Image (cartoon, rainbow, N blue to C red):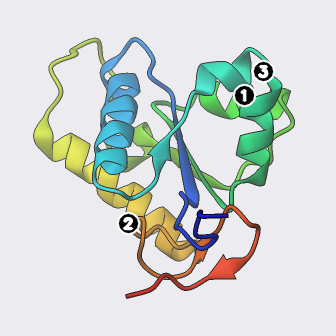
Amino acid sequence: MGKDCCQPTVTTMILACSGGSNVGQLSNQAAIELTQEGFGKLSCLAGVGAHLSGFIQSAKDIPGLVVIDGCEVGCAKGVLEQAEVPLRGYLVITALGIEKNKDLNLKREEIDRVKEAVRRLQADAGEQGQPEGKGTVTCGCRQTCVPKK
């Protein structure tokens, strides 16, 4: 048993729309950057949509779940509903005042606006939303631990 039980694990899963418009791609790019920054971890919405049990169970079990839809059509939300995954943190990019179009040349200020909205959503929901290794985390041993400083 050389493994330390209280190694931090990801507590926020990010599922992004990734549709064929600017807002779908903003959803995906924001999710990628948030993952790279340690906010949470991008996971595979297509795996949930394909009804692959591991993806569905992971989405049900994770303490923090953020779903980013590009527009009010709500494809990502629909995928979760079909898989009977409870919707927790939910953001629609067009509700931020970003207009949907077919221009896939993403604007830095729009990506940053989406990322900030996701962070606020998690903060408002009382979720951790912290970079991995900070604060209280859920451990692989199913205990709540405070990482060593």
Image side of residue 101 versus residue 130, left or right: left
| Count of labels in the image | 3
Front label number (3 vs 1): 3
Of all residues, the one furthest to the right in this rendering is 84
Q: In front: 76, or 62?
A: 62
SS category of the residue bearing label 3: loop
Q: Which residue is painted at 42% across and 65% down in the image? A: 132
Q: Amino acid at mark 3?
A: Leu
Q: In front: 145, or 126?
A: 145
Q: Which residue is mark 3?
A: 52
Q: Position of residue 9 (x, y in %)?
A: 55, 60
Q: Amino acid at mark 1?
A: Gly
Up the image or down, 96 lies above or below 123; here it is above
Whole-angstrom CA distance, mark 3 to mark 1, is 16 Å
Q: Which residue is mark 2?
A: 131
| Crowding near the residue tagged with mark 2, few <14, some 14–19, many ≥20 C-alpha atoms within 10 Å | some
Front label number (2 vs 1): 2
Whole-angstrom CA distance, mark 2 to mark 1, is 28 Å
Q: Are marks 3 and 2 in contact (CB under 8 Å)?
A: no
Earlier along the polypeptide chain: callout 3 or callout 1?
3
Q: Are marks 2 and 1 in contact (CB under 8 Å)?
A: no
Q: Which residue is painted at 13% across and 34% down in the image? A: 107
Q: Name the disc covering residue 78, or none.
A: 1
Q: Amino acid at mark 2?
A: Pro
Q: Which residue is painted at 71% across and 19% down in the image? A: 49
Q: Position of residue 40 (x, y in %)?
A: 46, 54
Quadrant position of residue 33: top left
| Crowding near the residue tagged with mark 3, few <14, some 14–19, many ≥20 C-alpha atoms within 10 Å | few
